[in-house]
Image: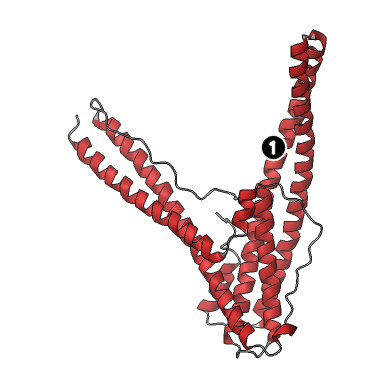
């Protein structure tokens, strides 16, 4: 869930509701918002990487001592065993501290990533609106600016996905194994009903989140169609350059290959995957709602 996504796109809604055109002033304001979030993003990323290196040092040292402890136990070296246990006790405090700091820095990088992504999406949306109103082939510079922000959006999503993984896994929870027992009282059945209803609420929230993700990806599809239409009409297509957003320093991936694969999924694949998940969630909601109704009928018959 992107907790900050609403903030910058809200400006677009206000402008649209007021009937305001996509003016250079609006683009300039959002460009400044993007720049501000770029600064926060770089600080958060650097802080996370520094915290990761510190945690990695203590974790590596911990694993070395654990391996030595195993060998020392096998050799029955009581003096060295006592020394290693003392070292592990001292190290555990630093290791726990480093792990806690890493979790905090990870959340901060997620926050900064979500803010920057929201700002980039808002800036691209304004750019696309201007592209849609421009005569086909009239202004190659519109494409250059679009490509600048679009490339940066892809880069930020790829970097945070591969290094941090998703903030929350979007997946279908297991079906709750709740059954009414012959000796259940009405109060016990009603407790199980509330349990089911709480799970329905969680699923409804997940469905809404998936709807938002799908809508945003479908919006990006519209952006790409607008870009392609403008590309097709630009005279001297070969002169249109795809600029690269400058970045401060390279980073090494920390995440797993699954995260990398998801980050590189085409829009159509991502939409299909999320749509399939949403359909499964809606089906699960119907199943649980039916179960609630069955339990409610049974509760009425219980003392």
Q: Quadrant of residue 4?
A: bottom right
On the question of residue 100 being in view, the answer is yes
In the rendered image, residue 167, in percent from the top left (x then y), is placed at: 59, 49
Q: Observer-nearest residue: 282 or 187? A: 282
For residue 234, above or below residue 42: below
In the rendered image, residue 208, in percent from the top left (x then y), is placed at: 45, 57
> Left or right of 89: which side holds 158?
left
Label 1 neighbour load within 10 Å: few <14, some 14-19, many 20+: some
For residue 177, above or below residue 131: above
Q: Quadrant of residue 52?
A: top right
Label 1 sits on a secondary structure element that is: helix
In the rendered image, residue 229, in percent from the top left (x then y), is placed at: 58, 83
Identified at 61% across, 88% down, the residue is 134
Q: Observer-nearest residue: 224 or 93? A: 224
Q: How is the image coloured?
A: secondary structure
On the question of residue 85 being in view, the answer is no
> Left or right of 111: which side holds 294?
left
Identified at 79% across, 39% down, the residue is 54
In the rendered image, residue 198, in percent from the top left (x then y), is placed at: 39, 43
| Residue named by callout 1 | 100
Identified at 78% across, 21% down, the residue is 68
């Amino acid at each position: 869930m992107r907790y900050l996504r609403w903030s910058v796109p809200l400006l677009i809604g206000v402008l649209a509701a007021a009937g305001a055109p996509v003016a250079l002033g609006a683009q300039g304001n959002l460009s400044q918002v993007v720049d501000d979030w770029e600064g926060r993003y770089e600080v958060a990323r650097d802080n996370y990487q520094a915290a990761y290196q510190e945690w990695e040092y203590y974790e590596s040292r911990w694993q070395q001592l654990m391996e030595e402890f195993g060998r020392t136990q096998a050799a029955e070296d009581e003096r060295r065993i006592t020394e290693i246990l003392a070292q592990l006790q001292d190290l555990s405090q630093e290791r726990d501290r480093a792990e806690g700091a890493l979790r905090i820095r990870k959340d901060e990088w997620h926050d900064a990533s979500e803010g920057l992504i929201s700002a980039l999406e808002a800036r691209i949306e304004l750019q696309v609106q201007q592209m849609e109103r421009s005569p086909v082939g009239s202004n190659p510079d519109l494409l250059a600016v679009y490509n600048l922000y679009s490339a940066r959006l892809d880069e930020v999503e790829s970097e945070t996905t591969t290094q941090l993984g998703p903030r929350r896994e979007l997946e279908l929870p297991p079906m709750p194994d709740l059954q009414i027992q012959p000796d259940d009282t009405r109060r016990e059945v009603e407790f199980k009903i509330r349990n089911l209803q709480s799970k329905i609420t969680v699923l409804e929230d997940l469905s809404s989140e998936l709807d938002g993700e799908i809508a945003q990806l479908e919006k990006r599809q519209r952006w790409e169609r607008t870009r392609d239409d403008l590309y097709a009409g630009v005279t001297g297509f070969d002169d249109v350059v795809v600029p690269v957003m400058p970045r401060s320093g390279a980073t090494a991936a920390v995440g797993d290959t699954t995260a990398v694969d998801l980050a590189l999924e085409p829009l159509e694949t991502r939409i299909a995957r999320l749509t399939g998940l949403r359909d499964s969630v809606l089906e699960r909601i119907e199943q649980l709602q039916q179960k609630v109704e069955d339990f409610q009928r049974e509760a009425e018959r219980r003392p």
